[in-house]
Image: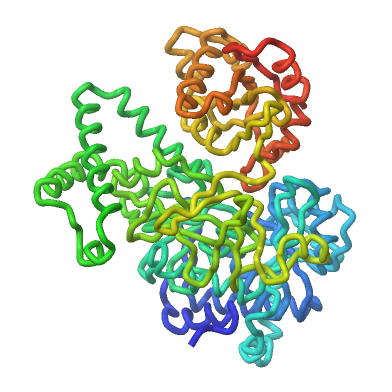
Amino acid sequence: MKPKNLLEAVQRTVERYPDKPALMWKSGGAYQSMTYREMWRQIQDAAAGLVRLGIGKDDKVALMSENNPWWPITDLAILSLGAVTVPVYPTLTPEQVSYILKNAECKAIVVEDEHQLKKVREGDADVSSIIVIRPGDGFAPGEGVLDMADLLKEGKSHPLEGWEKGFDEIGRDRLATIIHTSGTTGPPKGVMLTHGNFLSNMEGVHFWVIELKPEDVLLSYLPLSHVFERMAGQFMPLYIGTTIAYAESIDKIQENLQEVKPTVMTSVPRLFEKVYEKVQEQIESGTPLRRKIFDWAVRVGMKRYEIYLNESIDKLLLGDPMPPGLRRQWKLAKALVYKKVKDGLGGRIRGMVSGGAPLNPEIGKFFWAMDIPILEGYGLTETSPVISANPMVRSKVGTVGKPLPNVEVKIAPDGEILVRGPSVMVGYYKNEEATREAISEDGWFHTGDLGELDEEGYLKVVDRKKNILVLSTGKNVAPQPVETAINESRYIETSALIGNNRKYVIVLVVPQFENVMDWAKKKGIGGERAEVIRHPEVQRLIRQEVEKAVQGFAPHEQPKKVVIMEREWSVETGELTPTLKVRMREIEKKYAEQIEKAYSEDAGAASEVAATAD
């Protein structure tokens, strides 16, 4: 029988595996763990503490923290009361935090530390209670402010009678969360998702992508404020009985991979790109024999993948269809090459899920050749989030897989992807007009993405409708595929194509500064970073990297000029969303002078260098 709500889904796991590690985190230089039984006690105490603060059914409670064990504990405590969790990205500014708190009508907020507390206090949102998870030394709780330890202590002293019976009455149609969109095209909208939205998505994903098992260990590093990690990195593993280990930060991910040795993980393409770049760098600096062995191993892996892709599903389910000769080569390649690449990810990875942005197909094929399946999927906050995903059997690189079994997908006449199913949101909070624009009367959600279904039913996402560049010549350019190809260069961090209502396209490029500086040093080019980036040889390197990357595109899709940034783009400086998507409106506004300068001169192969606007 299917669970009625998210609490019941986790409760079943607690009953099955009470003494199994549920959560792991780094403390005192080593990973600590908490069992499912202990986690459940903490959820119950936190829920009782929230009730003492006046939190009850339908109240909105914000949660602003980096990933740690208190994220799921607090989230589930809120949901157990019939209340609503409102995630807030910890990277947002005080003004942005205040907007979300007011828009969602939050009664209380849980923050990670005093830095986040300061953001709340600097804003003008009226919240009655603020709970601080990790107060620093000398923390003095004020009126309406207390630390998590005190909340738990209060809850433990005043346990809720009939707590489990209370959440047993929560149905699938109960509102669970309000998640605000990134606001790339205007003010953020609050997406309303129910318990049933999440549960139906978990049911559609289970066994469709990686078959999660209780013995799996999942490394969580994507922000839990984002719906992808919340579903795939929190609710799903807790539903199955998987152990969740939290990475310390993106900067410590390599170290944490070796410590945790995860079997599965979710990620955005950038991590895979960095691993790919590192492997390529090691091979390029190796001996000719080492490069020859590596290239041979890649070819063997690709032959295996091609057989896997073209064989019937029935035969794949019966076992590996490799012919004996190729199987012998593959085993040798596995020992000589694949194992070393896998060891860099901890040594136990059996599969990874990629989402949030398009994965370069060449990088996807590389990992499959290395016997590390990367299963790319597609979804939005409004769809809880997964719409389609590549399954373990017959995963097709270059697509985002097939629609989930409980989701309908069709392509509109103008190419837009439309979705209908139980995981589609209720609507946007306090925004009926936007809801009507997004969801038709017969239940089809308009994703705003352009896509196509191939003959086997695999979905390919072309780009966002609003991203399509319409040149003054009448030709259209989808920037996403071009940018993805450019970003594959180990000397380029990210890029943005410009060209709407222009005669041709240009590209703004953020260099991969560490690799560029290393290259320059080997060439005898010294100086500060800004000086190095302006050096003609460095400009020529980046321009050539762009030219090489776009060779396969139509002439009107190839940028005629390269504008090189001197600083990284970041969430803090406004160019990126919290999910690391490029804010094109902000880019065009911030670099308007450099863009106009590039277009005012004759289009050619020259590159321009732009200083980041302060």
At 52% across and 45% down in the image, what residue appears?
358
| Residue 389 seen in this snapshot | yes
Q: Nearer the viewer, residue 482 or 286?
A: 482
For the residue pair 409 and 405, the one nearer the viewer reads as: 409
Residue 393, picture quadrant: bottom left
Which quadrant does the C terminus fall into? top right
Instruction: Estimate the x, y position of residue 338 in percent, counting from the top left.
Output: 26, 43
The residue drawn where x is 75% and y is 68% is: 61
Q: Residue at x 55, y 33 (%)?
A: 483
Residue 72 vertical placement versus 269 (above, below)? below
Where residue 541 sits in the image (x, y, percent)?
49, 15
Q: Visible in this render: residue 132?
A: no
x, y percent for residue 533: 59, 15
Q: Residue at x 46, y 84 (%)?
A: 15
122 lies above or below 540 = below
**Image check: 181 left or right of 369?**
right
Quadrant in the picture for residue 361 = top left
**Number of marks drawn:** 0
Task: Work out whether 543 lies above or below 467.
Answer: above
For this rendering, which residue is in front, 523 or 401? Answer: 401
- Is residue 375 shown left or right of residue 191? left
Q: Position of residue 583 (x, y in %)?
A: 70, 39
